[in-house]
Image: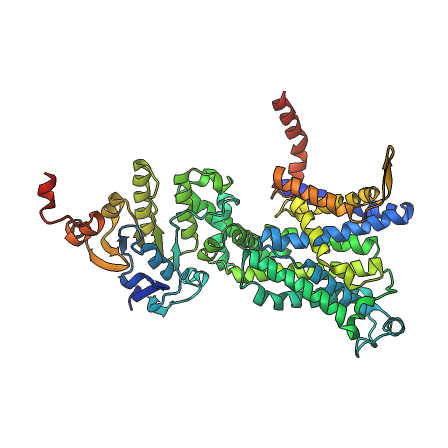
Amino acid sequence: MTFFSAENLVMSFGGLTAVDNFSLELKEGALVGLIGPNGAGKTTAFNMITGNLKPTQGKIFFRGEEITGLKPNAITRRGIARTFQNIRLFQDLTVIENVMISYHCRIRSSFMGAVLRTRLYSKEEKGMQEGSLALLNRVRLGESAYVQSGALPYGQQRRLEIARALATNPKLLLLDEPAAGMNPQETKELMDLILKVKEDFGLTVLLIEHDMRVVMGICQWIKVLDYGAMIAEGTPRDIQNNPKVITAYLGEGRKGGEENIA
Amino acid sequence: MNKVRDQILTVLGIIGLFAFLYWAKGNATEYHIRLLNNCAVFITLAASYNLINGICGQFSLEPNAFVAIGAYTSALLTMSPVEKQISFIIEPLIWPLNVIAIPFWLSLVAAGLVTASLAFLMGFPVFRVRGDYLAIVTLGFGEVVRVVANNLQSITNGPLGLKGLVPHTNLWWSFGFMVFALFFISRLTKSSFGRAMKAIREDEVAAEAMGIRSFRYKMMAFTVSGFFEGIAGGLLAHLITTISPVLFTFFLTFNLLIIIVVGGLGSTTGSAISAVLFILGSEALRAVEEPFSIGFLNVPGIPGMRMVIFAVILILVMIFARKGIMGREEFSWQGLFNLPQRAIGYLRKKK
């Protein structure tokens, strides 16, 4: 049984095929990067995996179960969590509330139990609070727990998104450009954080990123998308030297172009 | 420590409220008692409307329908068979409603349950759409209920309405139920379920990605809101003792919308404060609808002038104080104790 596999995913919006024949297999514990120029279909692929988009064709399996076309909440509850490219925090709620919401999907009390504050509910609420606080401390946001999340600095908002995703208790974590807009120091901290939580939580990570320091620095395996199609895959070293990838990113020079420039 | 103190203060507050009501019952005029009753019913309505609109963030426009259903259900169940026979002159009331007469409290429970189950059924088609579309669909539903009430003569007695209800609703009923509703709603919003609703309000896509079943919690907010609005409808019917479809037009929804927006969308406390201001305000503004004269200029009475003023207030709130009275804050005893200090600090800063 493969841990995760996507088979021949196709996503077309009317006449436009955003992702064409995308296949991906992940082994448990892997850290795979998904790269490609803007508009290559990386986020679309993420949205299909997490249920935000229903693939036009193809199937997705996760831990021996088909999850194609399930609702996002159902997929999250099966153990796939994600962060968003453009941060989507619950801005008006406090930092800790943002994390506690991710615990809600595992609550056992009924809503009447919550209104009546039964013993079970009180215990669960306390558990959520303690769990969230512990998680926030791990991503070094413990001190800001009761701050409104929209008021956090950018880098911390990114970390909060990761904490919130972790709180859903995932097996597979999808990170959509986690280093976007970060300075070199923050990026370095982020890389350490990703590696650390991957170990601590026993996660498998799939990562979209434009920052090559991150991709080359931590990914074990890289897949390259361009115009919705997979054009290459391999270890970071292979990818760096792959002519197809260089062409996709930098465009094709005319024959003898380099000499002309020189 | 603080928790115990707050609980004691809350209990004392409620006892104080009922002591005041006991005093008012003996000493206040009938007019003032009527005002108090209206306040209680509107606080209940506003708080439950705020649950779906402000907490869960689903902009819907149906409370007039829910209030109407609750009012008719409860009224039809308490009226005596003789009274019903006298009232229904065009078409007789259908069996078994024409022989039923049950106690008031039971009719309120029935009103709540009937309205809640209707809200539940209505939720399935309604929550397939979002945003403006949701507002339009629910607005349509409100209108449908009113038209049905106008035409389903063998049940609602059409435009003639139901008359001669026993004025069961007194201060105890209206305030007792208000306290219950506020307790229930504020407990719900402060719980994990309320947090899930707020998450949907803030960002539905992110909420779904965090495992929140958004459809389920929208339904929950809608049904609970329907339940309380239905019972409030029953109380309203037995307060004014005569109901007809004209009472439940879109204006009722519009008034409630003004209340929750001015109070601060998403704050139960704000809804309650604003509901009181609205009731007292519309009494105070009665003057503008009466004929008056400024110097030699004689102005005849203009009915509906109050609505113009309320509309202007709503526009001013939208421009200058978009968060309303309370924003999304809730009442807390600690907050009340901190208020003087904050006021002093604010004044010092100004200097």
Res A204 visible: no
User: Which residue is at the far bottom?
Assistant: B95
In this rendering, would A187 be left or right of A76?
left
Which residue is depicted at the point 15% across and 48% down? A253
Q: Where's the N terminus of chain B, which quadrant?
A: top right
Residue A60 sits in quarter: bottom left
In this rendering, would A86 be left or right of B275?
left
Which residue is depicted at the point 39% across and 51% down? A83
Residue B286 sits in quarter: top right
x then y, percent, for residue A115? 63, 56
x then y, percent, for residue B320? 62, 37
Which residue is depicted at the point 27% across and 54% down? A32
Given residues B297 and A155, the one toward you in this image is B297
Which residue is depicted at the point 39% across and 50% down? A84
Res B298 visible: yes
Residue A179 lies, with reference to residue B135, above or below; the image says: above
In this rendering, would B177 be left or right of B217?
right
Q: Where's the C terminus of chain B, which quadrant?
A: top right
Given residues B160 and B48, the one toward you in this image is B160
